[in-house]
Image: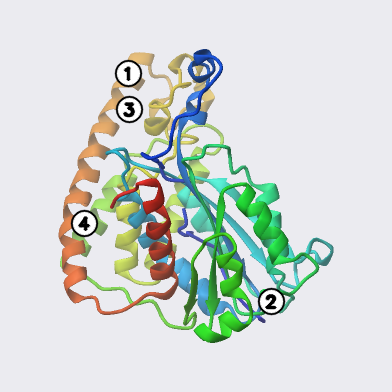
Amino acid sequence: MKTFLKTSVLSIMILGALSCNANAKPKKDTASIIEKTKNSEEKKQYIKVALLLDTSNSMDGLIDQAKAQLWEIVNELSYAKCEEKKPNLQIALYEYGNDRLNGDEGYIRQVLGFSNDLDEISKELFSLTTNGGSEYCGHVIRTSLNQLNWGNNEDDLKMIFIAGNEPFTQGKISYKDAAKIAHKNDVTVNTIFCGDYNQGISSYWKDGADLTHGDYMAINHNKATVHIASPYDNTILELNIKLNKTYVGYGKIGKEKIAMQAEQDANAISYSSANGVSRTVSKSSHLYKNSSWDLVDAEETEDFKYEDLKEEQLPKELKGKSKSQIKSYIAKKRAERKAIQKQIQDLNLRRRDYIKSKSKTNNGLESAMIEAIKSQAKKKNYQW
């Protein structure tokens, strides 16, 4: 396979959402104090998705699909619930099969480790470019299993999605050996062959998925993504402008991240207004978290203290303000944001119904990933 992702994703999408296995039996700890002393991060449950994308020459179409479909994938994950709890999402991104990468390391690069920063994911996805190379599927799977922090929570939904179109057997690292590591770590490997379904079977892409009880899918990666416009799109895009004004950047990266937010808005809408709407919907969901640079989100984290804020960290509009004045300002922005997000979500309900009534198409990468995620999530009692 001589190409795969020309730019980087899920921007996409994809995405750790809260996983919950109602059928799983609680472990018998030797002392209850162990549970009480776990930090809050360890108690969270996730859907963890690692995207392994072939960036050799023939994969430009697949990269375009990833960029154009990231936000709809994120949106679909945001609707997931387990026992009425909303999930968290983490996405990691790898590229492989590109001559620009280090051959001694298997022509593999970790573009981004597990992250819930959707803007960063989008930025890295859009940065990918293709170039001819050698595609070693077993090697990149093993690398992602060894490098990423998959965690030990048995209720987490842990998935690898690897996409490409060359034989799955290439390289010195056997995909079968990689599958054993995946199985040991409760990670499901899903394979997406870019081409004919039967050709993918004969080149062992299906076997690569079967070994970890994953899904094998074949897609037309050169098919253009179909975005369906709705009567609600313009209003949602107008609300996005208002939503951006509720972010209060602080610290060294505040200004940079606000600029990145606008840049990823532009990247999404470059495919169509409807795709820009999909990103706006993602930004109105609980999966869009920016506590590292936004004071509104940061204030809701457990370790945030106003006393720790330094004058030089504050944006221009808050410099010289008292603690109570800053609190009041943030509270006002939070109220504005929640109201705008609710408007977006309410409009999106009508938008989804409209699209459902008009849609007769299958968007390759998006449809394949969502189908696999939902199928595997059922085993841990997720509901949509």
The residue identified by callout 3 is 330
Instruction: Between label 4 and label 1, give the one nearer the viewer.
Output: 4
Residue at image mark 4: 348
Q: Residues within 10 Å of mark 2 (few under 14, many from 20)?
A: many
Pointers 2 and 3 in contact (C-beta within 8 Å) = no
Where residue 357 appears, as percent x and y from the top left, is 16, 72
Give the image quarter of residue 319.
Answer: top left
Q: CA distance from mark 3 to mark 4?
A: 26 Å
Identify the residue at horizontal 48%, vertical 43% (top origin). 156
CA separation, marks 1 and 2? 53 Å
Whether residue 258 is situated above or below residue 233 in the rendered picture? above
Q: Secondary structure at mark 2?
A: loop
Tag 3: residue type? Ile
Residue type marked 2: Asn
Give the residue type at disc 4.
Answer: Asn
**Which dot, 2 or 3, sits closer to the camera?**
2
Element at label 1: helix
CA distance for labels 4 and 2:
39 Å
Task: Please say if the residues under marks 4 and 2 sit with CB atoms less than 8 Å apart.
Answer: no
**Residue 5 visible in the current orientation:** no
